[in-house]
Image: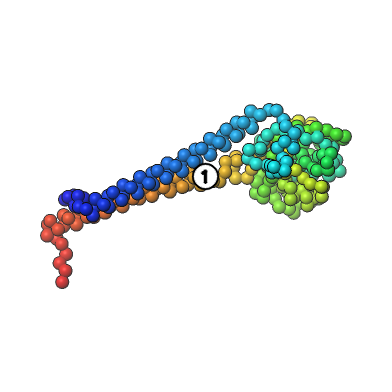
């Protein structure tokens, strides 16, 4: 009943099906390898950031060559020296730390060249004023570099807040509030929070823990290629079964009679 598989038409079709399955499996495995490589690179980057305890000047990470905070620099220890702008302290509401909602206390730090760094001195669940004003005079702050916030990330909003509050921490929002000569990208979460405030842990960029969307695209392509391979196998068996049933009908003389 299955002798038709030895005909040239079916042999050719089988070869094409096998080749198609092989290509799909190869492409699926390649995409899976790309996904695993990206995951591995991401883990190594996070481990390197965690292991790095030596703080570097902020200009070593944010400069003309690399002006923006990236997934490679988020969470890295930095130092910045300047003077707090005590008259323009801002509260950033609806920020969650350890499952509790409160405020970030953000104070601009002016550097010697006139630029500003958004320093989050800490987080408060109650009245942020209990922390008191920032220290006067020149200070050196050590903290962790953080990425710009975007709407929808960790309670960030576009606006509609009273004076003295900031909906999200990014350069555009800060420029709308305080027109300094320039802002460093991102912000710094100070390691040593004053009494009454809690230190802010590293906040990963919107979209997860820094693992790029391209990695999940690779994973999606992997599933698609494997599904294609399964579909080819399914169709081949279905066609074989249909042809076998037709052969059986012909052997029993059940072929339809054409007028």
Give the camera-side residue of 15 and 189.
15
Res 82 visible: yes
**Image quarter of residue 191:** top right
- Residue with the most extreme bottom position: 259
In the picture of the structure, the residue carrying the numbered disc 1 is 216
Q: Residues within 10 Å of mark 1 (few under 14, many from 20)?
A: some
- Residue with the most extreme right position: 137
Where in the figure is residue 166, as x and y percent of width and height? 76, 48
For the point 77% across and 45% down, the residue is 183
- How many marks the image carries: the answer is 1
What secondary structure is found at the residue carrying circle 1? helix
**On the rendered image, what quadrant is the C terminus found in?**
bottom left
Where in the figure is residue 169, as x and y percent of width and height? 72, 45
Give the camera-side residue of 210 and 158.
210
Where in the figure is residue 120, as x and y percent of width and height? 75, 39
On screen, residue 53 above or below 147:
above
**Image quarter of residue 103:** top right
């Amino acid at each position: 009943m299955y002798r038709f598989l030895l005909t040239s038409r079916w042999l050719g079709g089988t070869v094409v099906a096998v080749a198609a399955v092989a290509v799909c499996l190869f492409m699926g495995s390649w995409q899976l390898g790309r996904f695993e490589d990206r995951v591995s690179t991401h883990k190594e980057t996070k481990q390197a950031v965690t292991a790095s305890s030596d703080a570097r000047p902020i200009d070593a990470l944010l400069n003309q060559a690399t002006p923006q905070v990236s997934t490679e620099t988020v969470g890295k220890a930095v130092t910045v020296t300047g003077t707090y702008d005590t008259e323009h302290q801002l509260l950033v509401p609806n920020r969650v730390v350890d499952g509790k909602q409160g405020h970030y206390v953000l104070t601009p730090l002016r550097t010697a060249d006139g630029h500003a760094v958004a320093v989050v001195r800490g987080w408060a669940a109650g009245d942020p004023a209990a922390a008191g004003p920032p220290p006067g005079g020149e200070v050196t702050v050590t903290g962790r570099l953080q990425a710009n916030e975007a709407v929808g990330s960790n309670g960030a909003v576009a606006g509609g807040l009273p004076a003295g509050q900031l909906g999200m921490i990014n350069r555009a929002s800060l420029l709308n509030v305080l027109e300094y000569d320039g802002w460093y990208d991102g912000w710094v979460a100070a390691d040593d929070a004053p009494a009454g405030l809690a230190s802010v842990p590293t906040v990963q960029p919107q979209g997860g823990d820094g693992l790029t969307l391209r990695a999940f695209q690779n994973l999606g392509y992997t599933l698609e290629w494997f599904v294609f391979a399964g579909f080819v196998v399914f169709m081949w068996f279905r066609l074989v079964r249909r042809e076998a049933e037709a052969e059986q009908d012909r052997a029993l003389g059940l072929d339809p009679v054409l007028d």
